[in-house]
Image: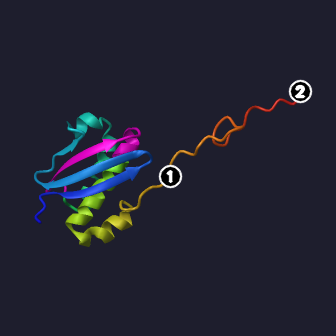
Amino acid sequence: MSQDFFYGTGKRKTSVSRTRLYKGTGSITVNGRELGDYFPRATLQMIIRQPLKLTKTLEKFNIACRVTGGGLSGQAQAVRHGISRALLEFDPEMRGVLKRAGFLTRDSRVKERKKYGQRAARARFQYSKR
């Protein structure tokens, strides 16, 4: 079975990104919109392009992402994780470079749940002595 794209799932906090890499010229679309429209901050765009710059494949692929959940920062990091996994599917030799940069490790830090009898996850209600 011949595949015309490489797939990777990326996750961060509550965001999930389904990423497809197609052979192309380097355009990136997120949820049907251009990268600059969806992620207006330059730092988020830089985060997404990091694995492509590291592996020198910035102009080799067109990238289409579907991302859900979370905020913009978490979504950008989920897209980066998905692109890294898809690049690994394209060329397993890139594993060492991507692993050293930390792009293949799923960042498992999520918001801690609020506990009963407390104001927040760790903050207690204000104590009144009298």
Q: Left or right: where does residue 12 sit relative to residue 126?
A: left
Q: Residue at x 13, y 61 (%)?
A: 3
* Quadrant of the rendering where the N terminus is positioned: bottom left
In terms of depth relative to the viewer, which is nearer, 92 or 59?
92
* Quadrant of the rendering where the C terminus is positioned: top right
The disc label shown at residue 130, or none: 2
Residue carrying label 1: 109
Q: Residue at x 19, y 50 (%)?
A: 63
Instruction: Classify residue 71 by image quadrant.
Output: top left
Which secondary structure, mark 2?
Answer: loop
Can I make out residue 124 in this image? Answer: yes
Q: Measuring from the top left, give residue 36's x and y in whole percent.
A: 24, 37
Asked if residue 61 lies in the magenta stretch, the reply is yes
Figure disc tally: 2
Q: Which span is picked out in magenta?
A: 58-76
Which secondary structure, mark 1?
Answer: loop
Instruction: Say whether disc 1 or disc 2 marks the residue closer to the N-terminus.
Output: 1
Asked if residue 72 lies in the magenta stretch, the reply is yes
Q: Residue at x 65, y 41 (%)?
A: 115
Q: Measuring from the top left, give residue 27's x and y in whole percent.
A: 16, 46
State the colouring used for the structure image: rainbow
Can I make out residue 47 in this image? Answer: no
Q: Residue at x 14, y 57 (%)?
A: 60
